[in-house]
Image (cartoon, helix red, strand yellow):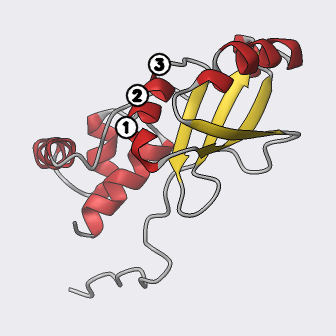
Amino acid sequence: MDVTDRKILALLQSEGRITLTELAEKVGLSVSRCQRRVRELEAAGIIRGYRAVVDAAAMGYGFEVLLFATLSRPDAVTEFDAALADVPEIIEAQRLFGEPDYLIRVVSADLPSYQRLYESVLMHLPGVRGLNSTIVMKQAVHPRPLPEHPSHEAPPSADPA
């Protein structure tokens, strides 16, 4: 991945609806070369998809919880992962090292609807030993694009030629 690929990715992350013509112009490529690079990034799995960023509260999901889950046994991971994928209110989940085993983002309309979800679904997920919920008060940093360069890597300098 070179500097141009990183510029393409940065632009697509921040301006997902940019036209191919605008993208090509901003990265200094012809439209056909830019399109080829985008297709290569998609084929390599670097670009995994395109989506709109939606206001959860406007969709009726104004209540967010970070749920920490600890499993009772290591062999429950596969079954637990599959069960998480079946719960639409779970919008993100990460497997962690150590305890707890998972960090899970859950959305609901309000506290009573979260309580119903917790009691009817979340407590009964396969292999669960314990759950700990933390209510999100405010999202201090909204999801944002990845940095153009890893922090351990200096940005490449422009060629003087």
- Tell me the mark number nearer the camera, choosing from 3 and 1: 1
- Whole-Å distance between the Cαs marked 3 and 1? 13 Å
Q: Residues within 10 Å of mark 1 (few under 14, many from 20)?
A: few
Using the image, tell me which numbered label, if any, was put on residue 86.
Answer: 3
Amino acid marked by disc 1: Thr
- Toward the front, the furthest residue is 73
The spot of residue 130 in percent (x, y) is 70, 40
The C terminus: image quadrant: bottom left
For label 2, the SS is helix
- Whole-Å distance between the Cαs marked 2 and 1? 6 Å
Using the rendered view, name the quadrant where residue 153 is placed.
bottom left
Q: Which residue is mark 2?
A: 82
Amino acid marked by disc 2: Ala
For label 1, the SS is helix
The residue at the point 77 percent across, 12 percent down is 116
The residue at the point 30 percent across, 49 percent down is 25
- In this view of the protein, which residue sits in the foreground, 143 or 19? 143
| Vertical comparison of 4 with 70: above or below | below
The N terminus: image quadrant: bottom left
The residue at the point 47 percent across, 25 percent down is 83
> Is residue 55 something that shows in the picture?
no
- Whole-Å distance between the Cαs marked 2 and 3? 7 Å
The spot of residue 94 in percent (x, y) is 52, 47
Do residues under tags 2 and 3 come within 8 Å of each other at their CB atoms?
Answer: yes
Does label 3 or label 1 sit earlier along the sequence?
1
Q: Which residue is mark 1?
A: 78
